[in-house]
Amino acid sequence: MGLGIAYVSTLRAKVSVLLSDKSQTQIKSGLAFFDKLLAKDMDKGKITNGEAKEARDRLRVVEDVKSMRDVDMVIEVGNADLF
């Protein structure tokens, strides 16, 4: 799903990220992992609660690629199990 890319983009580069996947299960799992990474960095004192909230607010789930037609860049992440 590319959650690592989304994590770094929202937290460090401070850019908005639109996230899409055919599988709702993958989306739920990915968002839970994203939140876990934020919590881990907060616990370690690497980021503040405010920084975590701002990063999470920059991440938005969209249903299809039509929602991405006005974006500056698209990164497609393939499933490693397919290769």
Image: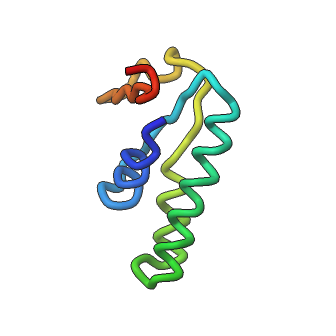
Q: Residue at x 34, y 29 (%)?
A: 75
Q: Is residue 83 left or right of residue 43?
A: left
* Outermost residue toward the top in this view: 66
Picture coordinates of residue 50, whole percent (x, y):
52, 73
Q: Position of residue 82 (x, y in %)?
A: 44, 20
Q: How is the image coloured?
A: rainbow
Residue 2, compared with residue 22, is above or below; it is below
Residue at position x 58%, y 63% from top? 36
Residue 33 location, x and y as percent?
57, 54
Residue at 54%, 54% (x, y): give it.
34
Q: Quadrant of the C terminus?
A: top left
Residue 57 vertical placement versus 22 (above, below): below
State left or right for residue 25 relative to residue 83: right
Q: Nearer the viewer, residue 3 or 53?
A: 3
7 horizontally vs 37: left or right: left
Q: Residue at x 50, y 17 (%)?
A: 65
- Point out the residue furthest to the bottom here: 45
Nearest to the observer: residue 75 or residue 78: 78
**Looking at this view, is 81 or 47 the one in front?**
81
